[in-house]
Amino acid sequence: MINSESNPFNEALQGFKPSRQSRFEGHPNELEKTPEELQIIEQASQLLEQELRELFPDTPMASERQLRVSDFIFLADSDIKAMGRNRREVLGFIDDKSKKAIINRTNSSRSGRLMSLFVTLHEGIHLKSSGFFEHNPQGQQSNRAGYQINNGEAGYKLSGFNEAVVEWMTYDLIFKNKDRLNQELAFTNEDWGNLAQSYKDQIAVISSIVTKVSEIDGRPPVESWKEIKKGQFGGQLMHLRKIERAFGKNSLKLLSAMGDEVGSEAARSRRLTLIKEYFCSADQRKRDEIGRQFFSDDANQLRAA
Ligand SMILES: [Zn+2]
């Protein structure tokens, strides 16, 4: 059960100074959650719990990272735009300041209940990923959010990879539970037809990585995928070294540079196109050539800047 009163981070919050606690308050225009939205949050919570139990059996991970009603703030599209999120049709995002998942009520309800569940689970996974709520001894926030690394002025690394892991995991989990979800939430074929996966280019890259790394490891692809999913919550990055073994030197640099563009932005991004070509290309000579092209593009951009 989800309970808005009990906060799984109460213990973690005990050490916080009052000023830090005050940052956990909601948004002034927060919309009251409908019974349907509460039900969707509860389902998302169950799905995440299922995943964490499978990935980390015999550890308290699943109970420590439970999704709560208070983790989510529902806002109207106009308020979301006022927060500067007008780059594209936003369904949800994580607000770094309040550490809450913000759901766009206007856009997500327009896309139907199943899509609302999809968005809620996707943002919920971001929220419970490695990095959030973790502090170094100086009390500073971790610079990690799942696989995404915030390098300050140098920008973000692995952001496209991070999105693809979250999106694919969400998709997998929802489809694995299709029958139960249909029974409990009465989704229709039309709902399933409207389910749209985002970050398609980045997912193609991960899919290719999983296939090739599993060949090198001599394990089924599902095991390599599991290792990637575990890193999302546990914070391990060492297994990414296998990507260099599978795709050659510089491949981690390219993967780090993969951004989180979607739709027309993705289609216009030469950087994303090159990275996708690199990872989805079958032969190493082609990859080396794309790699050279990528780094010479990069050098030109740096000179132009
Ligand atoms: Zn996301």
Image (cartoon, grey):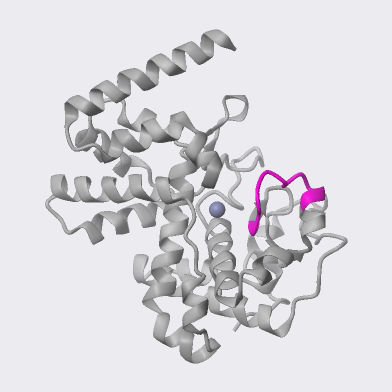
Residue 99 can be seen in this image: yes
Q: Residue furthest right?
A: 28
Q: Quadrant of residue 254?
A: top left
Residue 168 horizontal side relative to residue 283, left or right: right
Residue 162 percent coordinates (x, y): 46, 47
Quick check: 143 above or below 189?
A: above
Tell me residue 50's x, y (percent): 42, 75
Q: Quadrant of the C terminus?
A: top right
Rendered location of residue 32, percent (x, y): 80, 75
Residue at 32 percent of width and 41 percent of height: 240
Q: Residue at x 77, y 54 (%)?
A: 80
The quarter of the picture where the N terminus appears is: bottom right
Q: Which residues are magenta?
A: 81-92
Q: In the drawing, does residue 148 fall left or right of residue 12? A: left
- Is residue 20 at all visible to an observer of this figure? no
**Residue at x 23%, y 34% (from the top left corner):** 247
Q: Nearer the viewer, residue 154 or 301?
A: 301
SS majority, magenta: loop
Residue 83, magenta (yes or no): yes
- Residue in the picture at 47% in, 50% down: 199
Farthest residue toward the bottom?
183
Q: Is residue 91 magenta?
A: yes
User: From this viewpoint, which residue is outermost toward the top?
Assistant: 303
Count numbered badges in the picture. 0
